[in-house]
Every structure is written in structure tokens, then in C-alpha cells.
Amino acid sequence: MVRDATRRQFVTATGAAIASTGITGTASATGGRAPTAVRYAAFNVIELETGQVQEPGDEQAEAAARIIQEVRPDVLVVNELTNNIQEGERTDRTNIDAFVENYLSVPQRDDLEGIDYPHTLQPDSNTGVLPDDPYDFDKDGERGQRPGDAFGFGEYPGHYAFAIASRYPIRKEGIRSFQEFRWDEMPDNLIVTEESAGDDAERYLTAEEREVFRLSSKTHIDVPFDVDGDLVHGLFAHPTPPGFDGPENFNGRWNHDEVRFLADYVAGADYIYDDSGVSGGLEDDASYVLLGDMNAGPRTDRPLDPATTFLFANDDFDTCRLPTSPGGAQRGNPYATRFGGDFDGVVEQIDYVLPSPDLSIRRSSVVWPADAANERGLGDDVSRASDHRLVWADIVA
């Protein structure tokens, strides 16, 4: 971290002062109104593409919508939803708006109600985006070829992007995106360089490539929500998976630093700059919630463990009450949020809803029923929608 005192130490001290006045936990602490419990959710609906959401009737999108309508989150991030504007499919609406209009706002079962999300955001993604000048980032001998020579792995611009839907207003003037932040400008970064790469290395960055290569494989973005007059920052990212490379662990190192960036941002690191050129991280007294698929689980057997270092052992994130599920417990990890996929049978905890220490978690869960419990067909929907499971938490601002 970049400060002597963590954010939680700051908040704890402040909270102690408030408690001494006898108003903590009472309506008088919020100007006479009850605190607002907001349900935040993260759902990686694996590779949900334009043709699936722009028209109704897609089975995967319907299954995902049923799960979301069961949970009814107030703020939702959908990972791996194609950015159709970047893709070049310039329809009358973005994919997140189409998903809301065609699926989420329409009851997907007789006992469910639609959800209207009046506020949406579909950030640009680095996936499939090539630099202006061609580079051979993946060292296959060819320059400027997707997916390996893009800033983030993608077959086309906007592939594997993410989008946000909210019942609460987004303060658009306060959005800060970090899509263009260069990896080389993070102090003490773990970039595999041409000089440090071993003889068996499959990927590294030359000095020329480090001048342009971006840290974020999709984007990192701070989206402020107006929660009944209170400001809560939604922090979103989708770091690259830490695998699919050689012994140099290029993607593992990349994932490590993408996760680290979020920790440095909430700690107010001064090296950070956003896409508008504004420097610095969050203010000391800001409230925030980190949401999304971090592709990083705690205490794994991988060479690096950014989840433990920057999320679980970091007092700037509240990890005391983590969501669980019967389905994960049945497979040996009640906190798991992903199952199967490329690693058949493996359960992983990689999707998160983590608040700042000044916020309070009331309830949370991972939507993953036990195999024997398939009430209303939810278990079938969970398997059909994705290899990830929706994660949610009720958080009081």
C-alpha cells in the first residue's frame, strides 16, 4: 500500500469519534432518515454477444435474466457482455440497454417481475483494440494480429467487455476511466521484459512495446452512484486470467498488477492518472464497492496471489462477511463463484462484491443451489447462463 495508515484505520478512528456522540447506528446519523440498503451484484455471463441480446429469444440471455430477476439487484455489472459500439454493430441501442429492454425488464417466468434499469453504462474496453502502430505483443512472429497483439485478448474490439445497469443515478461528471493507463507507469510493476525473460519465455514486452502497452486488459473504471443523496463509488474491472501462457507467467503477472491497481486507487496512490489526465486516487473519506470478476482467488497454488495480498489482507476492503452458496459448499468451497469451464471440475472464488470499511453488509449470497434443490428451475438456469455464479450483497451506505 502507499500510505502509513490504511483507509480502514482512518474510518475506524472517525467512527470512534461518532460513536462517542451517541448517534452511531441511529436515524439521526443520516439526517433523520433510515440508511439505504442497496443490493449490488456481479455476474459474468460468459461471452454474451450482440446477436444474443439485441433481439429476444436467446436461451442463455433468458437464463441469465431469470437469475437476475430472482435476485433483483439495484446495481449490476455484467462481465463478458460485448460492447457493440466498439464492435462496429451500431444499432439504435447499446448491448446493455438491449439486454435490459429485451430480457431484464420483461418477466422471464410467470412468477417473476421485470426490472427497469434507467441508468446504464457501457465503457470502452481494451479487448481486441490494436495500437495505432502494429506490434507483436504475443511474439508469434506477426505484427498487428488479433487477438494476441491487441491491448486485451479479443477477437474484435469490445469482445469480453462489461457493462453496468443501475436503479440509482450515475453521476456521469464524476466517472473516471483508466483504459489508457500504461502498465510501465505503475511503480514496481511485474512486467516481463525482454531482459528478464528466460530462454523458454513465450511472451515479454520490449522497451518499445512498454511505451504503449496498457495495464487494463478491459478497463478499470470508477462510477459514482447517487444513493439517495449519498455518493458511493462503484469500482469495476475484469483483469486478465492468470494462465494460458508460458513459464514466464506473463498473464499471472499482468493479473497481479491489474488487481493491485484497484488497491492502490482506493489508497490514493499519486502515480495514477485517468483518461482525462487527472492524477491521484480516491479521497480518504470516499465510500466504494468493488464489483466484478477479478480472475483472482485467495490462497491458490499459482505463483502469485494478488487476491490475498490486495483484497483479503487489505483493510481497505471489507472481506469479513463473504457470500456463500450450497452449490459451492457441495463441491468443497462454499465461497466459490465459478465451476468447470477450461478447468473441468475446479471451483474458484474469483467474483466479488467488496465494500469499503465505512459501509455495512447486511446480507449476501452466491446464487448456486445444491444439486438436489432445483426449485423453480434455478439450478438449470445457473448452469445454462454461465460457468460463473451471480454474487450479490446488500450494503448500507
Image: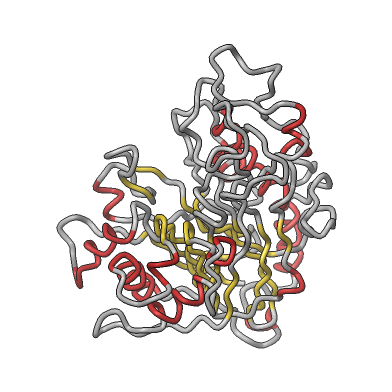
Expressed as whole percent of the image width and height from the top left, the position of residue 347 reads: 34, 42
Q: Which residue of the protein is positioned furthest toward the bottom in this rendering? A: 32
Expressed as whole percent of the image width and height from the top left, the position of residue 5 reads: 77, 46
Expressed as whole percent of the image width and height from the top left, the position of residue 127 reads: 57, 50
Viewer-nearest residue: 141 or 197:
141
Give the answer, above or below, for where 251 lies relative to 10. above
Give the answer, above or below, for where 353 lies relative to 264. below
Q: Which residue of the protein is positioned furthest toward the top in this rendering? A: 199
392 with respect to 149 (left or right): left
Name the residue at 71% across, 17% down: 195
132 with respect to 114 (left or right): right
Expressed as whole percent of the image width and height from the top left, the position of residue 150 reads: 60, 43
Viewer-nearest residue: 29 or 155:
155
Q: Is residue 37 visible?
A: no
Q: Is residue 140 visible?
A: yes
Q: Quadrant of the N terminus?
A: top right
Q: Which colour assignment does the render follow?
A: secondary structure
Q: Quadrant of the C terminus?
A: bottom right
Residue 396, image quadrant? bottom right
Viewer-nearest residue: 47 or 359:
47
Give the answer, above or below, for where 13 lies relative to 29. above
Name the residue at 76% across, 61% down: 14
Give the answer, above or below, for where 342 lies relative to 142. below
377 with respect to 351 (left or right): left
